[in-house]
Amino acid sequence: MTAEAAVVIPVLVAFAMAWLWALVAASAQIRCVDAARAGARAAARSEPEAAVLSAARDAAPRGARVAVRRAGDLWRVTVEAPTPGPAALALTLNAEAAALAEDSVGGAGP
């Protein structure tokens, strides 16, 4: 093995591992967004809070925290999850979705 190969191979392995971690983190971020949207849709339909949390947690990555709150006519669902992988690369992924509450739509007719 040449000296160049001895240097290049570990660099390529490190690059491949970093690329793999980035793909896994991007996938977890997409799952956070999907979970927030699912929870917001459930909350907008006036489902019980347990059902809203269940809908969001089912779509969220493992270890995610889900928060539901109402702000005026909007339901807001926030999902936070740690990135998978080593602690040295730890990030907190988060996503928030809002949906208009069905009970605020419509109102009295003319």
Image (spheres, rainbow, N blue to C red):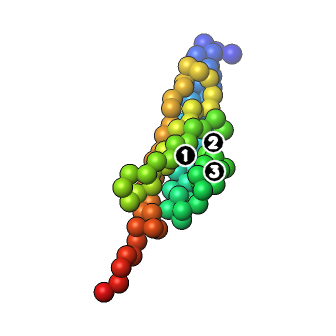
Mark 3 neighbour density, 10 Å: few (under 14) some (14–19) many (20 or more) = few
Residue 11 appears in the picture as rendered: no
Q: Position of residue 25 (x, y in %)?
A: 56, 38
Is 87 on the left-hand or right-hand side of 94? right
Q: Quadrant of residue 1?
A: top right
Q: Residue at x 58, y 16 (%)?
A: 7
Q: Amino acid at mark 1?
A: Cys
Q: Residue at x 44, y 60 (%)?
A: 99
Q: Amino acid at mark 2?
A: Pro
Whether residue 97 is situated above or below residue 14 in the rendered picture:
below
Residue bearing the label numbered 2: 61
Using the numbered discs, state the Cα–Cα distance from disc 3 to disc 1 in whole angstroms.
Answer: 18 Å
Q: Position of residue 14 (x, y in %)?
A: 59, 24
Q: Nearer the viewer, residue 102 or 28?
A: 102
Mark 1 neighbour density, 10 Å: few (under 14) some (14–19) many (20 or more) = many
Q: Nearer the viewer, residue 83 or 3?
A: 83
Q: Are marks 2 and 1 in contact (CB under 8 Å)?
A: yes
Furthest residue toward left: 110
Residue bearing the label numbered 1: 32
Query: Mark 2 vs mark 3: which is more N-terminal?
Result: 3
Query: Mark 2 vs mark 1: which is more N-terminal?
Result: 1
Q: Are marks 2 and 3 in contact (CB under 8 Å)?
A: no
Whether residue 10 is situated above or below residue 44 in the rendered picture:
above
Look at the numbered disc 2 and give the secondary structure of its residue: loop
Q: Are marks 3 and 1 in contact (CB under 8 Å)?
A: no
Residue 88 appears in the picture as rendered: yes
Query: Mark 3 vs mark 1: which is more N-terminal?
Result: 1
- Of circles 2 and 3, the one toward us is 3
Q: Amino acid at mark 3?
A: Ala
Q: Position of residue 76 (x, y in %)?
A: 45, 51
Q: Nearer the viewer, residue 40 or 2?
A: 40
Disc number placed over residue 50 in the picture, else none:
3
